[in-house]
Amino acid sequence: MYEALDFLKLFGGFVYLLMGGDLLVRGALGLARETNISPMVVGLTIVAMGTSAPELMVSTFSALSGYPGIAIGNVVGSNIANVLLVLGVPVLIHPIICDQEGLGRQTGLMIAVSVLFILLCVFQPITFWAGVLLVAILVGFLISATRGSSLMPGLDGAEEELERVLGLPSSSATIMLFIGLGVIALPLGADLIVEGGIGLAGSWGIPETVIGLSLIALGTSLPELSTTVIAALHKNSDVAIGNVIGSNLFNILAILGITAMMTDLPVDPSFLRFDLWVMLGAAIILWLFVLFKAKISRIAGSFFLAGYLGYIYLIF
Amino acid sequence: MPKCRIVSIWPSRLDIRTKLALVLVFVSLISMGLIALFAYQTSAQLLQEVSIRQLDALAESKAMDLTRVHQGWRDKTRLIRNGTEIQEGLAQFLANHGDAADQKLTEILEHTALSVEGVERVTVVNLAGQEVCDVGEAQVFTEIELPRGDREIVYQGVYLSDQKGLLVVFTTSLVVDNDVVGGMEIVFDANDLDRVASNYTGLGETGEVMVVTRTRNNKILVLNRLRHEGELVGPGEIPVSQMSDPVTRVLAGESDVYIEGAVDYRGERVLAATRYLTELGWGLVVKLDESEEGERATFLRDTMFDIALALSAFAIIGGTLLGFYLARPIHDLAVLVERMRHGEVDLRASVEGDDEIAYLGESVNALVDYLQEAQVQFPLDNLGRDQKHDV
């Protein structure tokens, strides 16, 4: 009975997070358009932070509630799921050729940031100043992006995409309603997810880190998965790589950084024994594909997917 | 004419599907919120009723336990009184009045006091009420009143002793060869009473049992140790003015249930159930802090809120899907008109169903057909010239 309730909470939490994130981003974009803010600034601030708001909310909520394992597990698990699942599933539909311009440098950055993350975990806890460092790196990347160095993939065209699909609010009242609903829905969803996750961990007798690495990470990666699957159905899988790299960079730099700025994050030793290395390994595999401008074929996608399922099996 | 299923662009204003979905989600959430509120109110009320019934049942159970304890003291008193050795020893003592008989009676009483659990003192008096012999250390400074009947056992009261704590006193007559030859006072410790009162099973974290009686100097004596030490450690005397409403009223002989308005000796608001034990003149109060009861209600409220919130996810998904489904034809029609405005004049609306939207689609198609035919018959240039001519 309680397990069913916890699953229900998780499900409801993800729905609220998705709805809240969508409303917040569309409301903020509507506001930006009405106030004539530059699309570049909008892309680098509202879209970037708004689309990461669900993950950020879950991580900060769990860390502040005394469950840092969920916060770190969410970041590590999301990064693993992004490479192995979010790339693995769409290539089963339509293969990806890793020959886009600038992809090598972006993947290299992802590996560098992942190594930095591992180092911070070694010298745990991840403190306020470590959080400042991560956010400072993020700000540096965003500034360099404004100069056209294209270090932060996944942001270009997000505004147009949202506007194209469902439009943006234009009246002040609707804009405020969207932002208000988003601001209310996000913490509600995060609270439900953390409660559900903790409840399930208790029922199953497993550490909350495992729930963070698996169910919660999977849930927060579902929007990326659906986007890439839809793109693959339109035979446009190539955008998936940019989304994955951008999402992984944001997970570490923004979500972990901001969460660490709010409260110190002690790192469970189990992360250093296994999960962080899986995350780094997945990033390196992706980098190898990019380095050789290889095609991520259906067979490779099957291996990615099998790798993810195997990883989930091992942590349970 | 090609019929098109419109799936493309609509410009930047907010999509009608989003608006309708938002309205449906909002209405669903309001409905769920009202249902959750109603469910919470009903459940909270039921929860309080259950708590009150539980308290009442506990009070009844404790009252029965205390009656059994009382009966136990009576049984022990009867056992001691009916002992052949005591009767014979007393008979010898009355017949001989010597040191040996006195010694013998003392030994018998000591043996009795040791063999019966909970006995603190046994005193034997003659018919004049003068003390003949006694064993034990407990000091009870009262005059021993002999029972009137030859078989009667009388509960005399409870007393606080500095050394022994609370003591319970019974008296009975002593009979030898069917003649009442004296009496006996037996003092018991109150451990059995304390054991009953200190059992907090079913009373949560703050629930408590108070057994009280009124003293001769019009104070209230709490007969058991209390759970909330430091504020009032029983047993002890308390002025009536400091006592709570349930205590004073139960000592007036009322057995009742207090759902609200009761405040205990700590100033805490409590739910309480009381019983008056007529035979002993004791009042029994079983109580539970309202705050703990409130915690249960808060837990219930939070749980129901979480469930309602989680279930509302279905309302959100359902509302969104329904909104998109219902508004899709209007959206498609609007996109169609927009595309026609941009030159795709061969497009026609897909007419499905028999509602107003289908009628609107048909009308749009008819209007476009008419305009196209009109343009063929009256080319735009001629029309323009004619208009100019008219002007």
Image: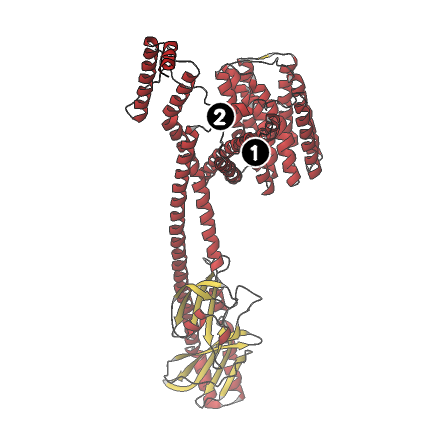
Q: Quadrant of residue A250?
A: top right
At 63% from the left and 34% from the top, the residue drawn is A256
Q: Nearer the viewer, residue B198 or A76?
A: A76
Q: Quadrant of residue B172?
A: bottom left
Quadrant containing the C terminus of chain A is top right
Across and down, in percent, residue A137 comes to 69, 29
Q: Quadrant of residue A109?
A: top right
Chain label for disc 2: B
Q: Mark 2 = which residue?
A: B12
The reply to whether residue A282 is visible in this rendering is yes
In the image, are marks 2 and 1 on the same chain?
no
Quadrant containing the N terminus of chain A is top left
Distance from the alpha carbon under mark 2 to that under mark 1: 23 Å
Q: Residue A128 vs residue B170: left or right?
A: right
Q: Mark 1 = which residue?
A: A53
At 42% from the left and 31% from the top, the residue drawn is B320
Across and down, in percent, residue A184 comes to 51, 40
Across and down, in percent, residue B219 comes to 49, 78
Amino acid type at image mark 1:
Ala
